Amino acid sequence: MKDILQQLEERREVARLGGGQRRIDSQHAKGKLTARERIELLLDEDSFEEFDMFKTHRCTEFGMEKDKPAGDGVITGWGTINGRMVYVFSQDFTVFGGSLSETHAQKICKIQEMAVQNGAPIIGLNDSGGARIQEGVDSLAGYAEVFQRNVMASGVVPQISVIMGPCAGGAVYSPAMTDFIFMVKDTSYMFVTGPDVVKTVTNEVVTAEELGGASTHTKKSSVADGAFENDVEALAEVRRLVDFLPLNNREKPPVRPFFDEPGRIEKSLDTLIPDNPNTPYDMKELIHKVADEGDFYEIQEDYAKNIITGFMRLEGQTVGVVANQPMVLAGCLDIDSSRKAARFVRFCDCFEIPILTLVDVPGFLPGTTQEYGGVIKHGAKLLFAYGEATVPKVTVITRKAYGGAYDVMSSKHLRGDFNYAWPTAEIAVMGAKGATEIIHRADLNDPEKIAAHTKDYEDRFATPFVAAERGFIDEVIMPQSTRKRVCRAFASLRNKQQKNPWKKHDNIPL
Ligand code: HXC
């Protein structure tokens, strides 16, 4: 008996070493942690339960039958993050470069299925040379099996991908179908075809970092939702994100203890809006002053900065925030900001996370670039996402809400539950000057008359009161009491029930 126990321990020891000490050292030399070290940092201490530690590949090509490392290049299992269950897979670059074989894929599929069945998020730590070259089509089949399960899990359990090394070719499509992608600066990259193929086909000379590094994907392509300095920071931030999320689509998000008075008055907000309506101000100041303990977890911070998306808590309860940012492009909506916010709104709606929308939007960005790029369809994504969302929706208009953008930003007409406006709100078809120049074109050469018309338009329409008279705004509120009002609004909506008509699924303009 003692021998058998010892044998088990010995086999475990070998499995834990993956591709061996030399390759572990090489991984460390690149500034990367090993697959097991990553899991240790991600999960609560001693909470990891491993599956399939001894699983090996079945390939007999290219002498592979002589090299069958236990675990086959991916470590899978479950554990807890602050006491809440998650499933995890972590690709081991020290074993065949973390490449995906038939059996490697089977291990990932197993935890995907268990996660859906048992209702817990899946976190994938990606560090892989792609399809296991020796296995050919078996490996491709393995990828497709993982993809299919990504699709089935979408909207059922949160799926989070962390790219911590190479992720290239078709391999990128599994992370691409998950809810959030995070990357590690300088050590990770994602692309469909690498720099060499790019050079051959398009003659462009580009480095791997330029083509698919963290900066490219968080600033240019929007493929990734956040970039972190190193493995340790990335894993700590994933833990922080998981704390905001429900475990699955049947559960409410967790309610955390909070130490911030829900009725807190913020007098400084009464002077947040500058006297000149064209002067920007930082919408993040409002977000931080409304949130419990000022804590805000931003998603896609470096992309389409004219809209802000992320999570806060109100009375301990997770709330998704969508806010126009007047500091960038005057906070207008455009293709990128509409896509960014639409995906975020849909994530929140999938997982029963209430949405707070803070509005200061002068309209959609004009121009040929926008029209040729399809701003009509992309803008419609955000409109559609808000319109179909059945979670509690609370909106606060701080200043401008002009034109179609007024409708889009969680207006009353898109089933907003509470639509508040500050006294500084201007709810109109467009700004006073533009409006005057259209309806009083005959007076365009008379600056005095134009000024008088503009003043008249401002007095009549650049206020929240016409909308309030119609009931499109439920209440005009004091800026200083915003936290108190939105906390009470969300509290009153805790038992909200709203259903859309039965359908197989909708047809959002993609
Ligand atoms: C098998 C692989 C491998 C792979 C790397 N290795 N990639 N083994 N299949 N795809 C092995 C290497 O042989 C080496 O083994 C070890 O992993 C480390 O690789 P190195 O090249 O030494 O590491 P590094 O210099 O850091 O370069 C990493 C790399 C490079 C850039 C990922 O290995 C590489 O280009 N690999 C091939 C990538 C690729 O073309 N994959 C297929 C893409 S197509 P030893 O024994 O020396 O340690 C694809 C299709 C998916 O993925 C389709 C889904 C639908």
Image (cartoon, rainbow, N blue to C red):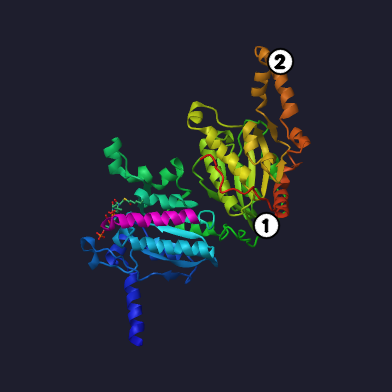
Q: Quadrant of the N terminus?
A: bottom left
Q: Amino acid at mark 2?
A: Lys
Farthest-out residue, bottom: 1
In-front residue for pair 335/330: 335
* Residue 385 on the magenta span: no
Identity of the residue drawn at 51% across and 46% down = 300
* Residue 132 on the magenta span: yes
Looking at the image, is mark 2 or mark 1 earlier in the sequence? Answer: 1
Identity of the residue drawn at 67% across and 15% down = 447
Give SS at disc 2.
helix
In-front residue for pair 99/466: 99
> The magenta stretch spans which residues?
131-152
Q: Position of residue 399 (x, y in %)?
A: 67, 36
| Magenta stretch, overall SS | helix
Q: Is label 1's Cβ within 8 Å of ligand 1?
A: no
In-front residue for pair 464/173: 173
Q: Amino acid at mark 1?
A: Glu
Q: Position of residue 129 (x, y in %)?
A: 32, 54
Determine which residue is flagged by label 1.
Answer: 315
Determine which residue is flagged by label 2.
Answer: 449
Residue 337 to residue 138: above or below: above
Picture quadrant of ligand 1: bottom left
